Image: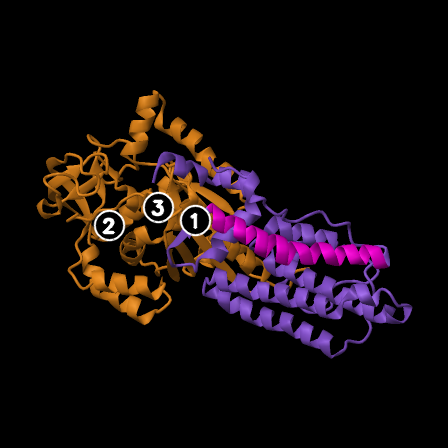
Chain colours: A purple, B orange
Amino acid sequence: MSKSLQNVVEPNRLIDTYGADAVRYFLMREVPFGLDGDFSHAAMVNRINSDLANDLGNLFSRTLSMVIRYFEGTIPAPSPPAEIDRRFQEVSLKVLTQLPEQMNNLSFHRALATIWEMIGASNKYVDETAPWSLAKEEKDRPRLSTVLYQTLESLRIIALLLAPFMPSSSEKIWVQLGMEENLWEQNMEENGKWGGLKPGKKVVKPTPLFPRIDTTKISFE
Amino acid sequence: MRPKSKGFFYVTTPIYYVNDVPHIGHAYTTIAADILTRFKRLEGYQAFFLTGTDEHGQKVEKAAQERGVDPKAHCDEMVKRFQSLWQRLNISNNDFIRTTEPRHKKVVQQILQDLYDRGEIYQDSYEGWYCVPCERFWTEKDLAGGNCPDCLREVVEILEKNYFFRMSKYQSWLIEHIEKNDRFILPTSRRNEILGFLHGPLEDLCISRPKKRLRWGIEIPFDTDYVTYVWFDALINYVSGIGYGSGENAFSHFWPQAIHLIGKDILTTHTVYWPTMLQGIGLTPPGMVFAHGWWTVEGKRCPNRFRMWWSRTG
């Protein structure tokens, strides 16, 4: 490997370019632990833009923006869950059962894929329940409260599960959800249960978690 | 508040060669260890995460000489590159061990003396070829056109007295241990690799270097003309870092359920030398050695910067 090629993957330079959490995520997600892998800037940018910016970043910012727009930033109290809500909750239960074994096997890429199933389910849930439509009618207010509470709660659990992988971003999500407890003093089994988020608390205006990377504006030389 | 502890958990990375420039491979192992530790802490375990640096050997001595500084001063400077990178990567290690620290040297000497007293170490003469830059011994048949098969540089012929650890006598015990514990070496491909290696005869391990050739090492307590072979010194960090021999509780809590994360290039030292050394002093082998793969960059192979190992026959 040439000296210059080595320099562009020097860890400090990777952190300067992509941020520590993105580097941590990429290395663990891209290749099964135990096998050989290839690092390329194109693959890295692709992971950041699709997994981090699109899937997770978007879920976070659109959910918080709606809570700010429709409830002035106050976490709404949920009404009794409908079928679609219960199905959504079950995803987090499944993820919580699978994760410990995947981690015991040092199967980091599987653990992340499992957490991303929950992120995917959350985005799908928002799309299907369409809170922006519910916001139009006063009579749909209880439904809107439930949907946004559920999405925020799912984000809280995602932040907890992702904390080992991306400590800074998870902490950011956690704090902006209005959680006052120290993230690192949580217990995954106890605090991973549905319903930990407290209605009435204020969320914070979201700052972009993972800005999209414009490949035309980045130079690796 | 956190409920009562679910138990103890211990994760390590290899100690990195202090002269190296930190690269993606170092970051990979360390990030994995950090994630595992943080996960276990959130599960309610009391988890201990140890990393550090390997600071002895000829290359360090030479690099310091070239810069006109004392080897320890050289290490003190070089180690910062690792420590600052771990800080930037948000690595939550509980301790950072350096093999030049008195707490480590003391344990290495204690273990050497213990093995010597038990008759596990003997003196014998060594005859063969030696590659100075690689710090490695080779037999006639290993050589590539008369040169070092690794770096292709010239080798020197040597005949000298050295000390050897009776590793060979643990061969059948080790095979049985690996076969009985299917999570001792992971992934399974690596386990098979080591079982394959153990089909051939296991030699005794040369664990000394005469001071006339290398001064920058840990002195052998029963013969001060020698220093300890770097790998023998380095592996002991996994127990010296949690207070072996100091009477501290940490050691009894965190040993032997250790999980050693390593790169696949240092599999033999961790799954052959290390468990037999432990067996020699009456300690149980670590719970798991997990060897991860290598990274290529844009399709090209990273240089293997981990220190090479050698045994009596090279």
Q: Marks 1 and 3, Cα distance to the nearest angstrom? A: 9 Å
Q: Position of residue B180 (x, y in %)?
A: 31, 71
Residue B249 appears in view = no
- Residue B169 image position (x, y, % from top left): 19, 60
Question: Which residue shows up at 26% across the image and 42% down it?
Answer: B229
Q: Circle 2 is placed at which residue position?
A: B117
| Res B44 seen here | yes
In what element is the residue under mark 2? helix
Q: Which residues are magenta?
A: A41-70
> Which sits earlier in the primary sequence, circle 2 or circle 3?
2
Instruction: Report crowding for label 3: few under 14, some 14 to 19, many 20 or more residues within 10 A (C-alpha).
Output: some
Measured along the vertical axis of the image, is residue A11 above or below residue B261? above
Q: Main secondary structure of the magenta part?
A: helix
Nearer to me, B32 or A76 = A76
The residue that mark 1 highlights is: A39
Measured as percent of width and height from the top left, residue A110 is found at 50, 64
Three-letter code for the amino acid on which mark 2 is drawn: Asp
Q: What is the crowding at mark 1: few (fewer than 14 residues within 10 Å), some, or many (at least 20)?
A: some
